[in-house]
Amino acid sequence: MRVHAGHVDGKRGEARFQGPEGLAVDPQGRYIYVTDTGNHRLRRIDSLDDTVGVTTIAGSTESGLAVSLCSFRSAP
């Protein structure tokens, strides 16, 4: 993961973050969710498929979006 000004989704080595802070992993360990605070976005990293890499799942270029991550728990 590279930290640069700006926002770029893409494969590993191509994606760009600015101010990544919080993260969470889904119960199966496939997806890593990152709060990219410098870009005001919630990003998802596909840890199993390098062709997908990083995608934005929420946010915009405007500040003010409140995104919080909760812990993921598997069903009983």
Image: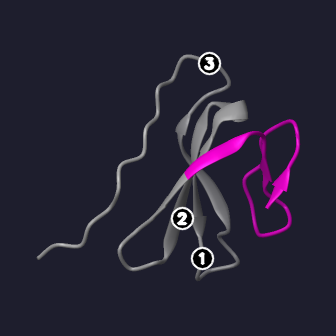
Residue 26 figure quarter = bottom left
Tell me the element at label 2.
strand
Q: Is residue 59 left or right of residue 13?
A: left
In primary-sequence order, the first of circles 1 and 2 is 2
Query: What stretch of residues is rendered in magenta?
Result: 1-22
State the predominant SS element of the stretch in magenta: loop
Residue 54 figure quarter = bottom right
**Front residue of 5 and 50:** 5
Disc 1 target residue = 47
Residue 3 lies, in percent from the top left, at: 84, 49
Look at the picture and state if 4 lies above or below 59.
below
In the picture as drawn, the residue positioned furthest to the left comes out as 76
Look at the picture and state if 51 lies above or below 42.
below
Disc 3 target residue = 63
The quarter of the picture where the C terminus appears is: bottom left
Question: What residue is at 35 percent from the left and 74 percent from the top?
Answer: 27
As shown in the figure, which amino acid type bears the numbered disc 2? Answer: Ile
Q: Is residue 23 left or right of residue 18?
A: left
Check disc 1: other Cα within 10 Å, few if <14, some if 14-19, many if 20+: some
Residue 62 lies, in percent from the top left, at: 64, 18
Tell me the element at label 1.
loop
Which numbered tag is attached to residue 32? 2
Q: CA–CA distance between discs 3 and 1?
A: 28 Å
Indicate yes or no whether the magenta region holds residue 28: no
As shown in the figure, which amino acid type bears the numbered disc 1? Answer: Ser
Q: CA–CA distance between discs 2 and 3?
A: 23 Å
In primary-sequence order, the first of circles 3 and 1 is 1
